Amino acid sequence: MSEFQNRAVRLMVASAGEASTSDISVRRTNVLTTALELYVALGGSREQLEATVAKQESDTPRRIDLVIGELMMEMATISHIHDIDVMQAAHNALDSGVRDTTSV
């Protein structure tokens, strides 16, 4: 694992406890909440969101490593468009401890 990933997991364990970091339902909710917040921050509309959700037809999810890779590429591209270093933004959030992992 990367230095950032190790630090993020340690911060989450310290703030929410070991059990929370391995609770997939908490992770799932946090990913969705954060993704929706980013979607809105990028100017996404409710209509676009509903249309996208409605056209999701696949019953078989793709491999998680491929989905994470695609998400990371999107994050890198969005960061590039907004002239933000994606890893610096991640470290800033980690260092400030803004994210309360117990509130979701």
Image (cartoon, rainbow, N blue to C red):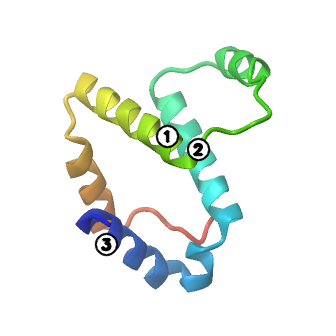
- Residue 3 or residue 100, whichever sits in front: 3
Disc number lying in front (3 or 1): 1
Rendered residue at 25%/57% (across/down): 92
Q: Which residue is mark 1?
A: 66
Report the amino acid beneath label 3: Arg
Classed neighbour count for the residue bearing mark 1: other residues with Cα under 10 Å, few (<14), some (14–19), many (≥20): few
Q: Is residue 54 left or right of residue 14?
A: right
Badge 2: how crowded within 10 Å, few (<14), some, or many (20+)? few
Q: Which residue is mark 3?
A: 7
Disc 2 residue type? Arg
| Quarter of the rendering containing residue 25 | bottom right
- Which residue corresponds to the image point at 78% horizontal and 23% vertical from the top-left? 57
- Residue under the image location 38 percent in, 79 percent down: 10
Query: Which residue is disc 2 drawn over?
Result: 63
Percent of width and height locating residue 90: 30, 53
Vertical comparison of 95 with 56: above or below: below
> Of marks 2 and 3, which one's residue comes earlier in the chain?
3
Disc number lying in front (2 or 3): 2
Residue 77, percent from left and from top: 31, 27
* Front one among 98 and 68: 68
The kind of residue on which mark 1 rests is Leu
User: How busy is the neighbourhood of tag 3: few (under 14 within 10 Å), some, or many (20 plus)?
Assistant: some
Q: Earlier in the sequence, mark 3 or mark 1?
A: 3
Q: Position of residue 59 (x, y in %)?
A: 80, 33
Say left or right for 93 vs 21. left
x then y, percent, for residue 47: 70, 15
Instruction: Between residue 48 and residue 75, name the one nearer to us.
Output: 75
Q: How many marks are shown on the rendered structure?
A: 3
Whether residue 91 is situated above or below residue 11 in the rendered picture = above
